[in-house]
């Protein structure tokens, strides 16, 4: 048994009182959570109107996405119940996380993925952690349908966000933000795919507010990719498309919960195009030093959209009030999806000082 200080202080240890765990729950942790909330002066300046912006950098979790927060709880509870295997559908990050936590727990993991649509870094992770990878001829929504069917069997536990233990763990990001800022922000922006995370944040803010730990709750503002925007359009998208493969989802599982979060928080749902997403990705990396995958950049692209006077915001709310405190969650690390990056490439020069100086352009 390790001393307390030697154990990784993950989400369960830090927020035990707010999670569905007991002393009997084995803690399967990789030290997830406690990610940096980065004050972002250039973003704040671009927004203007005396607003302050922070970026919650979830790419610094153990498998480099926010999924680890929920996965530590879901896999710990699965092990407590004696599950032999966990199963999930995924656009890549859930599968990477499930595979890692299953490896840590010593149980099997099967991941069902849309063939050819998973970012290379995420696929490498699933294989590296020893998951059984099944590619299907279909999209994420088809994969989730199959997983729901598999989940009715007693030997599998589904670890998609339809498992409430996942949502419970993901609330911890909202707890951390409140603890760090001393209250909830005024506006919280994040990308929306299967819609679990926006629902989890709203539940987390609600819980801290009810416990008297926060005086306010934020407006929840979600952004979908323009080609994969079922909540924005109010209808299922049969063939979702976007470069942001993590949020290439046409029929989100937590649609209703997310709609309630947006309505109850007086928030909004809007869309951003692939070009806006890639532009925001590049901007955030080069201006703030924060490199995120395309889906994550949707929150930043959305913020830019809201403060661009030339654009017509989808909702009146989205004219950001003066002096707002804004948190943007960026959900996954940029290295997960190197192929999506639109940056310059380097041309080789001769290995001499003169040639290198010329190339530098000084
Ligand atoms: N950002 C990233 C990087 C994601 O991987 C996801 C979802 C989201 C945002 C959207 O979060 O689904 O809670 O609305 N990825 C899932 C997956 C679907 O399989 O990895 P959401």
Image: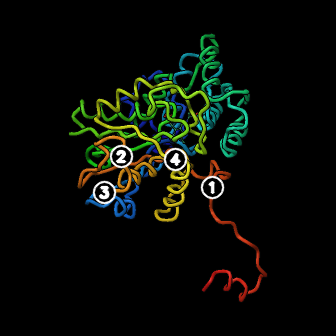
Please tell me whether mark 2 sits on a helix, a strand or a loop.
loop
Q: At x 46% / y 51%, what residue is drawn?
A: 301
Residue 96 image position (x, y, % from top left): 63, 37
The quarter of the rendered structure image containing the C terminus is bottom right
Query: What's the distance in space between the residues labelled 4 and 2, CA to CA?
Result: 14 Å
- Residue 12 in view here: no
Residue 313: x %, y % from top left: 36, 46
Compare residues 115 and 81 and report the one nearer the observer. Answer: 115
Label 2 sits on residue: 313
Q: CA distance from mark 1 to mark 2?
A: 27 Å
- Residue 246 badge: none
Query: Tag 3's secondary structure?
Result: strand
Whether residues under marks 4 and 2 lie with C-beta atoms below 8 angstroms apart, the answer is no
Q: Secondary structure beneath disc 1?
A: loop
Q: Nearer the viewer, residue 176 or 15?
A: 176
Residue 315, placed above or below residue 164: below
| Residue positioned most to the bottom | 354
Q: Is residue 212 left or right of residue 359?
A: left
């Amino acid at each position: 048994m390790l001393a307390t200080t030697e154990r990784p202080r993950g989400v369960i240890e830090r927020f035990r009182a707010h999670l569905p765990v007991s002393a009997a729950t084995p803690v399967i942790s990789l030290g997830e959570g406690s990610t940096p909330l980065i004050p972002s002066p250039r973003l704040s300046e671009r927004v203007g109107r005396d607003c302050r912006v922070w970026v919650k950098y979830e790419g610094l979790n153990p498998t480099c996405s926010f999924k680890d927060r929920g996965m530590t709880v879901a896999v710990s509870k699965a092990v407590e119940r004696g599950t032999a295997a966990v199963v999930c559908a995924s656009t890549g990050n859930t599968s990477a996380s499930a595979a890692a936590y299953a490896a840590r727990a010593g149980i099997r993991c099967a991941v069902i993925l849309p063939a050819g649509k998973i970012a290379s870094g995420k696929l490498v992770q699933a294989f590296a952690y020893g998951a059984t990878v099944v590619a299907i001829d279909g999209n994420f929504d088809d994969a989730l349908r199959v997983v729901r069917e598999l989940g009715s069997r007693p030997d599998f536990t589904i670890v998609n966000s339809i498992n409430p233990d996942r949502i419970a763990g993901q609330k911890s990001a909202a707890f951390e933000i409140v603890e760090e800022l001393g209250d909830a922000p005024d506006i919280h922006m994040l990308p929306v795919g299967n819609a679990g995370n926006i629902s989890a944040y709203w539940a987390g803010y609600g819980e801290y507010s009810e416990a008297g730990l926060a005086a306010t709750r934020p407006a929840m503002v979600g952004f979908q990719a323009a080609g994969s925007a079922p909540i924005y359009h109010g209808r299922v998208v049969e063939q979702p498309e976007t470069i942001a493969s993590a949020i290439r989802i046409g029929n989100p599982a937590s649609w209703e919960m997310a709609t309630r979060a947006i309505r109850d928080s007086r928030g909004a749902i809007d869309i951003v195009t692939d070009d806006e997403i890639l532009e925001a990705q590049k901007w955030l990396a080069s201006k703030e030093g924060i490199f995120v995958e395309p889906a994550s950049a949707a929150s930043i692209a959305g913020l830019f959209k809201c403060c661009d006077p030339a654009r017509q915001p989808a909702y009146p709310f989205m004219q950001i009030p003066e002096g707002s405190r804004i948190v943007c969650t960026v959900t996954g690390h940029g290295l997960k999806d190197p192929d999506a990056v639109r940056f310059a490439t380097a041309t080789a020069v001769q290995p001499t000082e003169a040639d290198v100086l010329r190339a530098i352009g000084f």
